[in-house]
Image (cartoon, coloured by chain):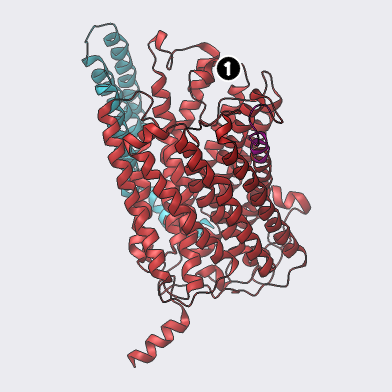
Amino acid sequence: MEAHNNHDEHNDGHIAEAHHPSYGINILVWIGLLSLTAITVSVAGVNLGGLALTVALLIATIKSLFVMNFFMHVKFDNKVVKIFIGICMLVFVIVLILTFFDLTFRF
Amino acid sequence: MANGTIAAPAAEVDFYHVKGRHKGLLSWLLTTDHKRIGIMYLTVMSVFFLTAMTFGVLMRLEMLSPGETIMSAQTYNSLFTLHGVIMIFLFIIPGIPAVFGNFFLPIQIGAMDVQFPRLNLLSWYLYIIGGALAIFSLFGGGGWVDTGWTFYVPYSVRTTTNVSLSVFAAFVLGFSSILTGLNFITTIHRLRCPGMTFFRMPLFIWSIYATSWIQVLATPVVGITLVLIILERAFGIGVFDPTLGGDPILYQHLFWIYSHPAVYIMILPAMGVVSEIIPTFARKPIFGYVPIAISSLAIALVGYLVWGHHMFSSGISDTSRVIFSLLTFIVALPSGIKVFNWVATLYKGSIEMTAPMLYAMLFLFIFSIGGLTGLVLGALNTDLHVTDTYFVVAHFHYVMFGGMGIIFFASIHYWFPKMFGKMYNEKMAKVAAYIIGIGFNTLYFPMFIMGYMGMPRRYYDYLPEFQVYHLISTVGSWILVSGILIMVANLLSGLRNGSKAPSNPWGGTTLEWTVPSPPPLLNFDQIPTVDHGPYEHPEIAKRKEIKDE
């Protein structure tokens, strides 16, 4: 069945392989993620008031970007996949904003 | 590809009779043929539907008179939960995409199968495992779940009934839904035949495409939410518990972030089927193809942003109440576009009132009432008056059963000849459709009046002034069930004794009507090439040609 698109798949596979991140980069990203986790835990102990949530979300966003781009290979993938993931992220952000319309103005 | 090694010339033999690696039951259970998987979904789903319908009838019997009639309050609570869980998670949400999407999506786009046939079979198994877990949860410790299908906290965390297993069942079913959506999106992008551009796809495919996106984007949210309930029950982590810094309204947000888009998972494919049936039986190209196609995507997008209207009386902020109310009114626009275009298609058409068309017309009538009463619930002031009353129950059933349920019946009548290669008794099918229409409105319309008068939902008892409405409603349930049983008997009789169906009994114009009934294993002798839109009737095209000359 997949025979229809063998040509495309070979191309996609070739592109992904050509830009496969090296072990060094993967380990660097991993260390970065661990550091950001440590920062999240440390910041949780500091009284930042209303900023606490913003800081936590900011760190989580940076971590997600690392995971998506390097561990999930989005950075090296083709445009359609990037657009699809962009749509998912956009929907997620809109959902978050709409939820905060409740939380922020509830009391 | 499907069912192991192919031993017969695929184009000659229909998919039921192809000899593969396995025989008998195994040839079904190990198949990767999208058509067989569609039929397996249909079989299991029919059992679930009839079971949940029986629960519904028993609930109506309990409401025949005030006080305890045939069951206790606790049993009633469990019955409405089971009725909801089975109908929503096992029938309405997967219904049309899993059965008719699986069977017809590849054929309508000129493909031999879905992009990932094995993943498709895995989705079916996950569906079966989820369904089995839901049934096991009935017999596990604590007794039948009594939370309602929404599993609202704090009750779902505190009740001693078997919530964790039921919730886990819904979690597994979610995976089935996500994988099916993923498979369909990929299939539509990668396997369209030559010439089948996006704007030459049948509108059923557009609706499945929009639905699949919602399945992929929204279902993970409810998956995580349901896991959080299990964790709350097991470890008391406090995400939803205010005494531990949690927020019970957060549960409602998370639940409805999925479950409102899920309403569109239920209704969009049904709208797609209507867009197939109307041009076929009006003998006209669909009016406003592009607006209908785009409105499917618009409904999917805006429908994602209106979940807060389920929470107007939950204590959310006034700001979000206003925003969600506004967004709710906006989502009515694309739905309206579809309805007006269907009516415009019928205008001056050469209408043939067959059973599928009759169901489609019934849908237009019932869904319009369901849609318009939705505006009463979307407006802040009127919603507060009728919230958690029978008005909501009536609206919900007019939209869900009147929308997806009736169109499921329409679909099975429309595609029955293609799926099984047999014809059913048309006259009996129409009789059943009329009885279903009368029964449906007798059952659910009194609920609007009761709800407006203040009859609360989910109570097994009521004040005597509501009895006349409950009585009418219960009688309606008997009429409706009679119609459904006649319909099922007629289809089964057609399956057994029906005359052989031609390849195109209705004069349809989409690709499934170009292949034999039932289709061969690989659907087509050769992958077709498409050079025109999906609803160009040959007689109209000829007339146009003559005019041009």
Span of residues in magenta? B57-68
Residue drawn at (45%, 48%), measured in percent from left and top?
B370
Please state the horizontal and vertical placement of residue B15, each as a whole percent of the image.
Answer: 67, 63
Where does the C terminus of chain B fall, quadrant-wise? bottom left
Locate residue B428: give its quadrant. Answer: bottom right
Please state the horizontal and vertical placement of residue A54, each as a whole percent of the image.
Answer: 24, 20
Q: For mark 1, does the 10 Å Cα neighbourhood hold few (<14), some (14 to 19), or many (20 or more) residues?
A: some
**Residue B59 included in the magenta stretch of the image:** yes
Disc count in the image?
1
B153 vs B69: above or below: above
Please state the horizontal and vertical placement of residue B153, each as a whole percent of the image.
Answer: 48, 21
Question: Is disc 1 placed on a helix, strand or loop?
Answer: loop
Q: Which chain is red?
A: B
Taking depth in this image into account, of B254 and B205 the one nearest to the observer is: B254
Q: Which chain is cyan?
A: A
Locate residue B201: give its quadrant. Answer: bottom left
**Residue B138 included in the magenta stretch of the image:** no
